[in-house]
Amino acid sequence: QVQLVESGGALVQPGGSLKLSCVASGNIFSIYVMGWYRQAPGKERELVANIPITSDSRTKYEDSVKGRFTLPRDNAKNTVYLQMNNLSPDDTAVYYCYAMRSDLWYFWGQGTQVTVSS
């Protein structure tokens, strides 16, 4: 099993920045990919960004966040971050950290609310 704990959600003004954190624990050596999904009210959950943990493959970003969001990680702390810049109201959502095993089994965090509003 893998446990994921997110933090960092907040209310932020348009144009502002926010950094979410996701700490993984448990059987972390089984993780193949980590990243973030988000779900806005009335919308389906969508992939924001992900990164393979065990290879040098590049990070993948959803088109609407390219150039604004990055996915740094700290392997020593088993932590993946979501750095969000130039936020807009369209980014308002609950953000979920996830980890995927090589057998495509998903683990999810509890979610953290990001609200972009003036």
Image: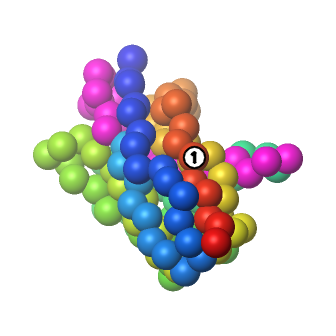
Q: Is residue 50 on the magenta stretch?
A: no
Pick the front one: 51 or 13: 13
Q: Amino acid at mark 1?
A: Gln
User: Quadrant where the C terminus lies?
Assistant: bottom right
Query: In the image, is 35 to the left or to the right of 29?
Result: right
User: Quadrant where the N terminus lies?
Assistant: top left
Query: In the image, is 79 to the left or to the right of 69?
Result: left
**Most distant residue in the right direction:** 42
* Residue span colored magenta: 23-42
Query: In the image, is 62 to the left or to the right of 44?
Result: left
- Name which quarter of the figure residue 7 lies in: top left
Q: Residue 43, position in %: x, y?
A: 82, 49
Task: Name the residue rendered at 22%, 53% in the picture.
Answer: 74
Q: Is residue 33 on the magenta stretch?
A: yes
**Dot 1 alpha-carbon crowd within 10 angstroms: few under 14, some 14 to 19, many 20 or more:** some
Q: Residue 36, position in %: x, y?
A: 52, 50
Which type of secondary structure does the marked residue at label 1 adopt? strand
Task: Name the residue rendered at 66%, 52% in the picture.
Answer: 93
- Name which quarter of the figure residue 30 lies in: top left
Pick the front one: 60 or 92: 92
Can you say whether 63 is above or below 76 in the image? below
Task: Name the residue rendered at 36%, 55% in the picture.
Answer: 81
Q: Residue 44, position in %: x, y?
A: 79, 46
Instruction: Report which residue position mark 1 lands on.
Output: 113
Is the magenta region chiefly helix, strand or loop?
A: strand
Whether residue 29 is visible:
yes
